[in-house]
Image (cartoon, helix red, strand yellow):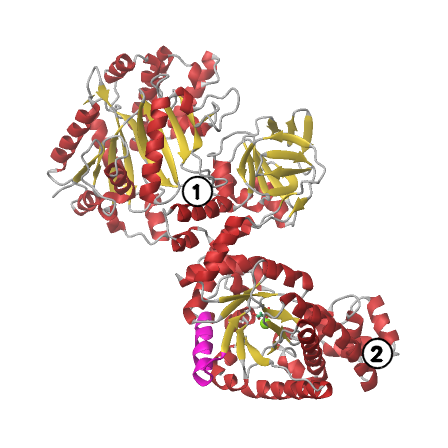
Amino acid sequence: TKWVYSFGNGLNEGRAEMRNLLGGKGANLAEMASIGLPVPPGFTITTEVCSAFYDNGRKYPDDLHAQVGAAMQRIEEAMGLRFGDADAPLLVSVRSGARVSMPGMMDTVLNLGLNDTTVEGLARSSGDERFAWDSYRRFVQMYGSVVMGVAHHHFEDVLDQFKRTLGVVDDTAISATQWREVVKAYHEIISEHTGQEFPSDPQAQLWGAIGAVFGSWMNPRANTYRKLHDIPASWGTAVNVQSMVFGNMGDDCATGVCFTRDPSTGEDVFYGEYLVNAQGEDVVAGIRTPQPMSRARAEEGQNPMETVLPDAYAELLRVRSLLEGHYHDMQDIEFTVQRNVLYLLQTRNGKRTAAAALKIAIDMAREGLISKEDAICRVPATSLDQLLHPALDPKAERVQLTRGLPASPGAASGAVVFTAEECEARAARGEDVILVRVETSPEDVHGMHAARGVLTARGGMTSHAAVVARGMGRVCVAGAGSVHIDYTTMVMTIDGHSIAEGEWITLDGSTGAVYLGRVATIPPILSDDFNTLMGWADATRRLGVRANAETPDDAKTARRFGAEGIGLARTEHMFFGPDRIGLVRQMIIADDEAVRQRAINALLTFQRDDFVSIFRIMAGLPVTVRLLDPPLHEFLPHAEGEIAEVATALGRTVEEIRARCASLAEANPMLGHRGCRLGLTNPEIYAMQVRALIEAALQVSDETGKGIVPEIMIPLVATKAELEVARRAAEAEIISVLQERGASLDYRIGTMIELPRAAIQAGEIAHHADFFSFGTNDLTQTTFGLSRDDAGSFLPFYVDHGLLPKDPFVSIDRDGVGALVRMGVERGRATHPGLKLGICGEHGGDPDSIAFFEAVGLDYVSCSPFRVPVARLAAAQAAL
Ligand code: PEP
Ligand code: MG
């Protein structure tokens, strides 16, 4: 059996498709090497060895040693070095690599092959004794902790103690002789804690590291992770052994991280940072300030790689086009230059902001690198939210405190806090907060999530804060060096300004500026790229996209975002205006018919005006108006003054009004006297609404010459009879309006399907409906028997504990609520071919749910105006 696959230097035995055999990392390395990228040579021990190892009582296959030996020899030839050589030793890295990346396993050992003899060889061949001993101590520390299991902090303690004695702060100030001492101390720690000597034989080191990788496949953390993520233990992990290359062997060496395009804006410029004479971790650690790649992006005093290492830079440009040509996506790469020779260590699809995702997708489609369909799928629908983020109002007054890196775009203001915990606590109380840290780590992620924005004093565009904030769509300014934070007094100072916890600042993540106090923001301007993508999405999707809107402002926003009509106008929202609520209360409470009718007539005028403005804004697009839905008591007066007002208007005593209000109270109002039940028992309310709607439609039809076709929607129907009667009443009112006016008008009458019974009886109900609109908010509530208004206190527990995969009010429960929707669709269409079908619950703006609605064949989704672009894109993605 072939257990070992070589890569690099022209010998490429693996392929990208061999992921199961070579693991993710191994397959990637094989692929990179095979397209001509300069990867350091190495080999992969297959996942089958891992399985064989565990099947045979932790023993390797017989011929594994021979195959590894041969592969090591090939690396030696490629690099012109020998493993364990006293003069010019080859050093390797050993890494794990399962099919999917998996925390909990042994990760990496670097510089393997060093011992007391080879370190001298490295010192001679590199001409840098200090570097050799520094590499050696890094290796002993890493090997000691990950292979031999000595806790990391023991090494740290020794080093700290050393530095204190020497009076130095930076590792860079430690000399070769001093590192020698540290190495000796490290060796002692290891024998003290393990009772074993640190292995000096490179072969023993190699097999120790290989064994540690395979051993870690079954360690408890890895087992737990696999269980949580349904990864079978039988997959096994591969081991990758690769030649070390050094970016810290002198001034013709360097290391860097870069993106093939700008991950913030998407601009087609090579983007990143590098450090001369440094190791990879130095770039991320933020101790030295990285330098820009290109002259074009360099500011005065900076040393771009293009100038400093022109040959390696030219090679990098060649690599860049190879990468995009092959991967058809923006790449995030890590590279090292050793003695002017470029090596590519890693490439992966680069993380990017929503704005960059959009621009890159459009540009790449235009460049012919990807298709329009690919472009549509490259932009996560939910990320459009970020593009719709506010920016600073250019006219707003501002006091700039400092400037850092523009790490994640958008503008945000909030109270300064210095810990993730405080950030979460304040956000939970509804405060806007900005998390300010020297730098962030994974422990801060929950705080970052709760924050409006993140400001760090240290770190570059690839720092933790920058990458995580970008991914979350949080505003971020990183590496603002003049920010000094005192975590004990909870005060930061910026160039003489003191800002205590709780004081406000504003971040502009698009420029990196930090301002004092709150600076006004403006809504985002939609770019041409955005419009292009939306155009492609519109040409691709089958589902229509409407908006839920009842105010003129919302209707305008909806149109601006491309809604193709209104799928739900909740008329009760029109009842709460200060000029109306009094009339609504009189309508509900009056027992004198004449008084009641007077209130209703007055409301009619308001409703008609509301409908007129909506019809005008929607300019002939379909508008679905839902008749009154909530229980009447929601409109009742509570405050003394309100009650007195109604009493005066109706000529009653306060006590009488109070008694009447009390009589309207219900134990379970959401399951009580609401929806069509209300319309059927109080027919004059629906009659007024229908009249207002028809009169408005006639008026706007006359004005515009466009025939307005109003869609009247009856809520909370459970039975065929309810709809039949409600429809008959509505039609009687329509006919009387049309007769009064001597006019004619097309209209549709439909219903919401938001009760399980309605979905089950959809075939019967469809006889009386021109359309259905699934009210998945109530349908979720009634299917689960789960109150929409109370679930917040325990649903998170359900989701956290895996009792529900997601909040069913956010993302449709396909198996339960979704099954009812599917049933409603099938049964409705069976008796009424051509029945128009939509959905107007919150799920109409959720990409996962939209994929489901596409699959069940709805005609349109309707969602809140700001989510209309999300829905348009999600609908296109669902259609592909
Ligand atoms: C629904 O129930 O899904 C719906 C859209 O109506 P509302 O949210 O107004 O109850
Ligand atoms: Mg409802």
Q: Quadrant of the N terminus?
A: top left
State the residue position of label 1.
351
Q: Residue 827: say if magenta.
A: yes
Q: Nearer the viewer, residue 585 or 354?
A: 354
Q: Is residue 870 left or right of residue 648?
A: left
Q: Which mark is residue 702?
A: none
- Looking at the image, residue 870 lies above or below residue 47: below
Q: Is residue 83 left or right of residue 691?
A: left
Q: Main secondary structure of the magenta part?
A: helix
Badge 2 density bin: few <14, some 14–19, many ≥20, Cα 10 Å: few
Where in the image, quadrant-wise, is ligand 1 located? bottom right
Q: Nearer the viewer, residue 652 or 796?
A: 652
Residue 150 image offset from top left, x and y in percent: 34, 30
Q: Is residue 68 left or right of residue 125?
A: left
Q: Nearer the viewer, residue 335 or 670?
A: 335
Q: Marks 2 and 1, how far apart in space?
A: 65 Å
Q: Residue 522: say if magenta.
A: no
Q: Please report the residue visible at 38 percent of the width from the left and 20 percent of the height from the top.
A: 277
Could you tell me the amino acid type at mark 2? Answer: Glu
Q: Please report the residue visible at 86 percent of the width from the left and 71 percent of the height from the top.
A: 644
Could you tell me the amino acid type at mark 1? Answer: Lys
Q: Earlier in the sequence, mark 2 or mark 1?
A: 1
**Residue 809 showing in the rendered view:** no
Residue 592 image offset from top left, x and y in percent: 82, 85
**Residue 89 showing in the rendered view:** yes
Q: Please report the residue visible at 47 percent of the width from the left and 48 percent of the height from the top.
A: 358
Span of residues in magenta:
818-835
State the residue position of label 2.
656
